[in-house]
Amino acid sequence: MIPRVARLVVAEFIKLSAHPFFYLAIAVLAVVIVVAEVLLPPVRSQNETLWKSFNSIQLFAYGFKFGLLLASFVLLIFSSMMFAGEFDRGTIKNLLTRPITRTDLFVAKCVTVLALAATLYLFVLYVSFLYAFVRGDLGSVWDDGQYIMHREYGELAGYARKVVLVSFLPFLAAGFFGILVSNWTDSSGYSVAIALVIYFIGYLITGWFSDAVQRYTLFYHITYGVEKLQTWAEGGRTRWNPDVERGILYATVPLAYMAGFVPVAYAIFRSRNINA
Amino acid sequence: MVVVLRTEGLTKHFGRLRAVQDLTLEVDEGDIYGFLGLNGAGKTTSMRMMLRLIRPTAGRVAIFGTDVHDDFIGIMKRVGSLIELPAYYPYLSAVKNLEILRLATGGVPRSRIEEVLTIVGLRDRMNDRVGAYSQGMRQRLGIAMALLPRPRLILLDEPTNGLDPHGINHVRGVIKALNKDEGVTFLISSHLLHEVEITCNRVGIIKEGRLLLQDTVSRILARTVSGLSVTCEPAARAAELLRKEPWVSDVRTDELGALRVTCDPARFADVNSLLCKNGVTVSELSPVRQTLEDFFLSQ
């Protein structure tokens, strides 16, 4: 099974890398990250003074937050086209009349989403870091008006490292949500629309819930870490949520969601008749 | 004769619609088997069940003597198919489209891609985006996809759809050459009866989901003889003589003045001797055949 899946993953990347939307999405992502890092400091009242230039980790937090959010939409778009696109074009019948099983194809698509998520995540990380380090300085966060240190560099860097680690699983879960939606319909257009609407509305609605409820929603965790880092790097007092930390909810909640999405998507895919 | 493809009691119901009912057919090694039926007769549904794209309500399919559920991967290494319209990634070239299928198939050398594109006559345009191809070129690409794994059995669903006469002729030539030179077995569904008549050696006719008959094309054509055309002098006397015979069921005069005699083909010689004995000069005798199309529509 492994060689078959490996070949199918290569085939998936041939399709993905030639997709007209792929490079456009990457370009938009890079622009949004840089724009966020350029525009957000003045919007958030962060200024440069005689003794203080912009803090790189602070800029990184701005870029990473918006980049991650947008990348989760990009991931969702591609993953929600994964199966629906094959049904839409009819290419699913080409694939399933080859010497492979439906399980091979499903696993290959999941691996592709995982690899795409990692690629997008690393790209967002890279661009956010790159601009932040070119534009700002590494070091502690200082007060604008007085020669007072708000945040010591080591503590801030520790926050940033943790954010990079805790943000990936919720991001990946968005991709697997796309795979689930992709199996509901034969139309890639509908699939993308359904996935985006549910995801966007879910993201908005989650904000109205109490904290006790929010922490069990997927959307809360996508920006959980990076929002803490942003506030912390701006000199605010926000700390990690003790309830989230205790249950390692930034990992367990997305894993639980993925454990729900994947088997349902697989069951639908296995049972479908191919009339495309 | 080795049976390459066998279906037994293959049935598919979509709710109350009985798309295919109790389909039992056999395709022998080396056959070019024409699967004839009107639109909606159940041809494509049957072929999808053969390839396990849809689940049958009942029945089984065996290819190369093995049930498709027992060794699907092993079987599909030797099967090529084109079901309904060819499907492709429009933003990729023909080469990339075939590369994806080459990877999905496994064990196919990269050089095979150029080979199959040459066979279907797309070599010159192989690096163009398939989205820019004409309908006929896409159909050829679909056939190239079916040929890619060097299959021993190829299922083609309406393979000449969208092709111009030159394209149809080319595809027919490819099918016949592969069958003759490499012994590839074909199951070809079509509603183009003339095409089946000149391409296939065996035919199965399906109507409303049921297989009406399955036989060699030559035997079916023999069954299409519906009477005898007789050009003779005097025609009126001949018609009078023939109408008196109990084994002659009908005698008519066609627009050219020849007699159309409807009787058992075994009595054709008796027609000739009867007319000669009675002083009628017979200048031409020829069997009247229904076309396969007429025969098909009369079923």
Image (spheres, coloured by chain):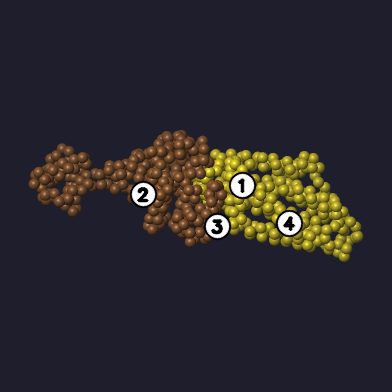
Q: Amino acid at mark 4?
A: Tyr
Which residue is labeled 1 in the image? A6
- Sequence-wise, which precedes: disc 2 or disc 3? 3
Q: Which mark is residue B199?
A: 2
The disc label shown at residue B91, or none: 3
In this picture, residue B182 sits left or right of residue A62: left
Residue A210: x %, y % from top left = 75, 43
Q: Would you say the residues marked 1 and 4 are in contact, meaning their CB atoms lie under 8 Å apart?
A: no
Which is more foreground, mark 2 or mark 3? Answer: 2
- Of the chain colours in the picture, the one used for chain A is yellow
* In the rendered image, residues at marks 1 and 3 fall on the same chain: no
- Quadrant housing the N terminus of chain B: top left
Q: How busy is the neighbourhood of tag 4: few (under 14 within 10 Å), some, or many (20 plus)? A: some
Distance between the Cα atoms at labels 1 and 4? 27 Å
Callout 1: chain: A
Amino acid at dot 1: Ala
Badge 2 element:
helix
Viewer-closest of B141 and B180: B180
State which chain is coloured brown: B
Q: Which chain contains the residue that carries disc 3?
A: B
Label 2 in the same subunit as label 3: yes
